[in-house]
Every structure is written in C-alpha cells, then in structure tokens.
Image (spheres, rainbow, N blue to C red):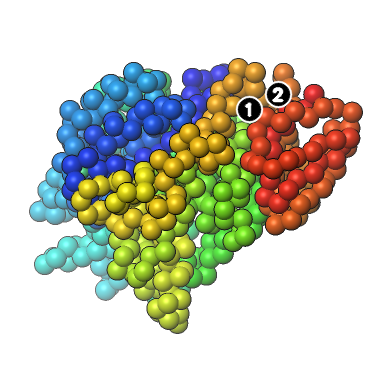
Amino acid sequence: MEKQWWQNRTAYQIYPKSFLDTNGDGIGDLPGIIEKLDYLKDLGIGILWISPVYVSPCADQGYDIADYYGIDPKFGTMEDMDRLLAEAKKRDIAVLMDLVVNHCSDEHEWFQKALKDPEGEYGQYFYFAKKKDGKLPCNWRSYFGGSVWENVEGTDWYYLHMFHKKQPDLNWENPKLREEIYKMMNWWLDKGIAGFRVDAIMNIKKPLPFQDYPADREDGLCNVGGILGSQEGLRDFLNEMHEKTTKPHHAFSVGEVFGLDDSDISRFIGDDAYFTSIFDFRQNVAGQTMLGWYDWKAPTPDEYKECCFTSQKVSEGVGFFSNIIENHDEPRGVSHYLPEYAQNEKGKKLLGMMYFMLKGLPFIYQGQELGMENCAFPSIEAIDDVSSRDEYQRCLKVGLNEKEALKVVSHYSRDNGRTPFQWNDEKNGGFTTGTPWLMVNPQYKEINAASQIGREGSIYEFYKSMIALRRDDRYEDTIVYGVTEPVLEDQKDIMAYFRRGEKQDILVIGNFRDEAAEVEIPELKGKTCQVLLNNGGTCMAVDGKVKLEALQGVVFEVK
Ligand code: GLC
Ligand code: CA
C-alpha cells in the first residue's frame, strides 16, 4: 500500500448544531467552528468531518437535506463556509463534508415535484408504489420505527423511506439521479473540500423487486438493516461513484459501512477501492439485537478487545479502518465501554489509549477529548432524537415502566453525543448565551475544556500527547504503519498489543481491572521498556514482567 497524506493525521468530528453558538439563537453555527479552529489545531487535528450543515428542516438533524448546494441559515451562509475552508486550509486542516445521498428531505425540490406526479420524471428519483391486493410492496421496518412505506396524502400512492418519513429514499437505479449526485459531489470537491464522510451508503441498493422477509417482531415487519449489505449491484454504484467523483479529484472518503462481510473489505478500502477508509463499527454493534434497545447489552472490556483485534486482523495489509469509540449516533464511549468503576479520568484515558494506538485512522468525536459522558436526561421530553422517542415507546410496549424505559433510552440515546459542547463552567457551559436547543449535560461544571487545557494530567492533555506521539518522527512509522500483534489475549480484562514497525516495536498495554495486575510477556526478557505514554501511576516492566495499577494503560517502546 502506498503511503498517503492522511494516514498519520488524527481526525475530528464536529456536530455543528452542538459545537459553539455565536449569535445566541441556541444553535451552533459555522462561525462557531471557525472561532474554534485554533482549539482544534492546538489539539493536533489534521482532518475535520463536519456533520451536515446543508439546508434542512432538521427532522433528523440535518441528515434530511432540502438543498445540497445551500447552507442552512441557522448554521450560517455559504460565505461562512468559504471562510471556514480558507481558515482551515491555513492551519493545514482538511475538511470533509457529510454526504447524505441515500435519501433527501421531503422538502427537497425533487420530492416536491415527484409528489405532484409520482409517475413523472421526478417520481423516478424516488420509490413510489401502490398497494397490490391490499398489501404494501414489502414488510420492512424503518430504522426509526413503523413501515418504510408512507402514504401520499389524498392518493393511493406510497413512497419508500428507510429512515424518517421526512427522508424519502433516492432511487439509485435511475442513472439521471446518479448523475445529479455526482455533479453535486464534484461541485463541492471543486470548492476545495478534501472529501466526504459518506452517510448510510449500504442502503442505496435495495433488493428488488420488493418482497417480504421473515418478520422479526410481533408487528409483522422486518428490520431494514438486516436485509442490506452484500446486495448484488451495490458494488456497481459505489464503483461508479468513485470513478466519477472521488478518484479524479484524489479525494478522501470515509464510508459509514454496516453489515460488510470481512471478505469484501478489500473492495471498500485500500488502493483503488470505493472508499479511502470505512468506519469500524464492530465494537459499536457488539451486543445489539433486532429486538430493540431494551434488549441490548454493552460489551465487556474483553468483548471490546476481541472486536478491536478481529478488525485489526482482517484489515491488515488491506487498508485503514477509521477507529472510533463514539459519534453523533452512539452513546458516549466512556459511558458505554467502561465498567462503572472505571468511569473516571484514569479509565477514560485508558480507553482512549487502547483505541487510539490501534492501526487505522483515529477519529475523535467532539467532547471525547474532555471525557464527556452520557447525559442524565430527566425525562423523555428532554430528548429530541427521533430514534430515541421510538425506542422509548418500544420499551413501554414490551412491558417496561417509564422509569426503566428512560434508563434504557438514556444509555443508548443518540442525544448523549449531541448535548452541547462543554467549553467552560459558565452559563450553558459556554456553548450559548441563549437557550440551547438541547439541554447541556449538568456535568459541565466539572467536565469542560477551560479546566483541562494546560492542566497537567487532564484528559484533554492526554489526548493531545497521543496525537503528538502519532506524528512524532521517531515513532510515526510504527504507530501509523506497524502491524498489530495482540498478546495476553486470554488474560481477563487486560488488553495488550504490539505494534511492530521497521524501526522499533511498541507495546500498548492496559489493565481494565479495578485492582493491580502483573502479567508476563516472555519476549520482554532482557529488553528495556521505555515509557512513551502513561495514564498515571507508576509502572514497571522488568525481566519480562509488567506490573500495572488498576486502570493503568502504558505505551512502551521495547528495545
Ligand atoms: C446515518 C447518520 C445518522 C442518520 C442516518 C440517516 O446513520 O449518521 O445520524 O440518522 O444516517 O441519514
Ligand atoms: Ca447560532
């Protein structure tokens, strides 16, 4: 694999609505991002993924786009966008836009025209159908609950939406639609963005003709997520998109790819694959079932490490996964993966170290670098997210009481990642002078950027040193390109791996137990272990034995 400009960088995801509000309307905006570019630069960020800021009625927080060529006034203007691109460039930060092309908003001009004439030109941009013998074309359940088919009021037409009913699916079978998408992508690439994060891309190919699948719940429907993935024909779309947009622009792309068979990875990442990288969701989906959030379980540290190691193995020599512990659709990583006793500064740094030192491109989600946690939502009304509201109803339906339902939803709610960024301990955590669109996590008094920047031992400073280590000339080759080799795999609650490079070996070792641990790694006998990073406490690696305090994580250079 040829070396690429992006590989030694660290990426950062911004959820604009919740990052920084500069005009007091309670909604984060583009000027807010511009204001904080130096914050990101100081942290060491080299790639920025910005969640959607296009014109949108926000039924799904901007993932329902009404105009791909316009910035929504609540986020700013196209001039702000241009300024953001220019200012980012000055700081050598590459900007990725979110590409949401499985669906658009029902308020998009195409859909408005299609509604008027479902059998006309724009009707072909979507999926319209009528009932046959009183039956809808298929029994799929949308990601946000209910049938994927929505009636067009006053007619006998139905249209397909895999997500919210305000997100009609685009018909990728139609070459005209595909050309419109490619034109739009090229327009943005010509503007100077570095590339895209590609939303929900496994959904663009539907198994046709529509048909029922075995129901997985008592509603007689079948989860739409379970039937996608290796659709024949998906590859043709992805290949064409790459050939006509990202490839000629030498652009970067990172796909939101679920349900991929490991044997297909080389088509998705690596030299001349559809994408530059794809997110590794193996650990995020661990413990999930088709039944709903009430039935899900968070992975244990050992399950977590197993997921990471499997992903390292299947991507080795193929390409770079993008590694995350959270994003705007997930609970906060520290609240999800860490046992309760580990939900403190030390444990948070430990988890950060374990994922960050893996091979791949690390993404940090806004606030992760401060150790932001899930929010204790006081009631379901405090939660805005469409999927959380649906799952809450689901909990009640299967017999949980309101308190239990709130507990489930509070753990998995997508709004955990969407509460405003905690800049300081002042009003609204410094996010806005107005009323924030979503409640601020009350923890902002203790967990905020101002109290961590420059404080020795803070989570922020720890992240900063990890990012710096990744770009340190002495170690970069090993950390970025070295092969990952797990050790001590059967040691409960110990996660350890070597990164084998041409210049040196690096050992990453962490103790997830709430007590000290001593382990033996015979290979270390007679070698010296120099500490490159340590999340706190003393650590010893002598004569092949490594002693770690509870929740300690260390990166050693082994010589
Ligand atoms: C992706 C986005 C999510 C959105 C969905 C529909 O999964 O990350 O936020 O709801 O696609 O666009
Ligand atoms: Ca604002």
Ligand 1 closer than 8 Å to label 2 CB = no
Q: Is residue 482 left or right of residue 162?
A: right
Task: Find residue 247 and report its horizontal and vertical position in percent.
Answer: 40, 23
Q: Is residue 547 visible?
A: yes
Q: Amino acid at mark 2?
A: Gly
Task: Find residue 280 and report its horizontal and vertical position in percent.
Answer: 54, 43
Tag 2 residue: 501
Q: Is residue 417 left or right of residue 488?
A: left
What residue appears at the point 62 percent right and 60 percent down from the top-left corner?
A: 341
Q: Is residue 504 above or below residue 34?
A: above
- Between the C-alphas of marks 1 and 2, the distance is 8 Å
What residue appears at the point 50 percent right and 37 percent down from the top-left corner?
A: 455
Q: Is residue 342 above or below residue 482?
A: below
Task: Find residue 181 and report its horizontal and vertical position in percent.
Answer: 27, 35
Number of numbered callouts drawn: 2
Task: Find residue 45 and report its horizontal and vertical position in percent.
Answer: 45, 29
Image quadrant holding the C terminus, namely top right
Give the camera-side residue of 418 and 25. 25
Pointer 1 with pointer 2, Cβ within 8 A: yes
Tag 1 residue: 479
Q: Element under label 1?
A: helix
- How crowded pointer 2 is (Cα within 10 Å; few <14, some 14-19, many 20+) is rated as some
Give the camera-side residue of 369 and 477. 369
What residue appears at the point 59 percent right and 27 percent down from the top-left corner?
A: 469
Q: Is residue 299 left or right of residue 61?
A: right
Q: Is residue 389 left or right of residue 261?
A: left
What residue appears at the point 61 percent right and 48 percent down from the top-left corner?
A: 346
Image quadrant holding the N terminus, namely top right
First in sequence, mark 1 or 2: give its number. Answer: 1
Give the camera-side residue of 540 and 329. 540
Q: Amino acid at mark 1?
A: Ile
